[in-house]
Image: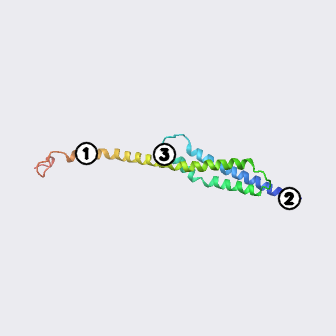
């Protein structure tokens, strides 16, 4: 006997739910892998974690779309509990992405300042040597080390 239409729809709803859960799990593992080891105040760590969040944003968006699609197929009038939880998480995620803007700005400026300081440290011996060479005693147009 062939399964009824309603049981096929219920099977599809369950499949969509588990696919969405798997996508959220993949995203969580990816972000966790980028975040470990924790170095909360290092700008490079912040850039790496924010890059991982931005790069994998399609997984949670697709998961939420699948959950909403499963809810459309659901004929019951009551809203599923997982959908309420997902809506709250989506609101927190949106706030988190907005807060990421100033955080990344600060981290980017800190990284650029660190790179600038490293370049200045590499150039310091050359600027000292150049300054020492330019401040030696001069007699006329000749330098004392060139002979007469």
Q: Name the residue under label 1.
A: 129
Q: Which mark is residue 5?
A: none
Which callout, 2 or 1, points to the residue nearer the camera? 2
Residue 125 point in image, percent of width and height: 29, 44
Res. 120 in view: yes
Q: What element carries label 1?
A: helix
C-alpha span from label 3 to label 2: 56 Å
Q: Mark 3 points at which residue?
A: 44
For this view, does 116 lie left or right of residue 99? left
> Quick one: label 2 or label 1, which is nearer the N terminus?
2
Frontmost residue, 80 versus 54 = 80
Q: Residues within 10 Å of mark 2 (few under 14, many from 20)?
A: few
Marks 2 and 1 in Cβ contact (< 8 Å): no
Residue at the image position 74 percent from the left and 55 percent from the top: 71
Residue at the image position 42 percent from the left and 48 percent from the top: 112
Q: Name the residue under label 2.
A: 4
Marks 3 and 1 in Cβ contact (< 8 Å): no
Residue at the image position 60 percent from the left and 48 percent from the top: 30
Residue 33 point in image, percent of width and height: 58, 45
C-alpha span from label 3 to label 1: 33 Å
Residue 102 point in image, percent of width and height: 50, 48
Is the image coloured rainbow, by chain, by secondary structure, or in one colour?
rainbow
Q: What element carries label 3?
A: helix
C-alpha span from label 2 to label 1: 87 Å
Q: Is mark 2 on a helix, strand or loop?
A: loop
> Quick one: label 3 or label 2, which is nearer the N terminus?
2
> Quick one: label 3 or label 1, which is nearer the N terminus?
3
């Amino acid at each position: 006997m062939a399964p009824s239409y309603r049981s096929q729809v219920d099977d599809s709803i369950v499949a969509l739910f588990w696919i969405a859960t798997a996508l959220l799990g993949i995203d969580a593992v990816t972000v966790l892998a980028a975040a470990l080891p924790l170095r909360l105040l290092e700008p490079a760590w912040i850039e790496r974690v924010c890059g991982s969040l931005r790069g994998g944003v399609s997984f949670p968006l697709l998961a939420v779309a699948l959950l909403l699609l499963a809810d459309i197929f659901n004929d019951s009038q009551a809203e599923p509990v997982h959908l309420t939880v997902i809506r709250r998480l989506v609101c927190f995620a949106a706030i988190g992405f907005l807060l990421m803007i100033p955080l990344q700005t600060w981290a980017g400026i800190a990284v650029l300042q660190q790179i600038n300081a490293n370049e200045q440290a590499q150039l310091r011996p050359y600027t000292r040597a150049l300054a020492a060479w330019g401040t030696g005693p001069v007699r006329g147009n000749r330098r004392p080390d060139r002979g007469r």
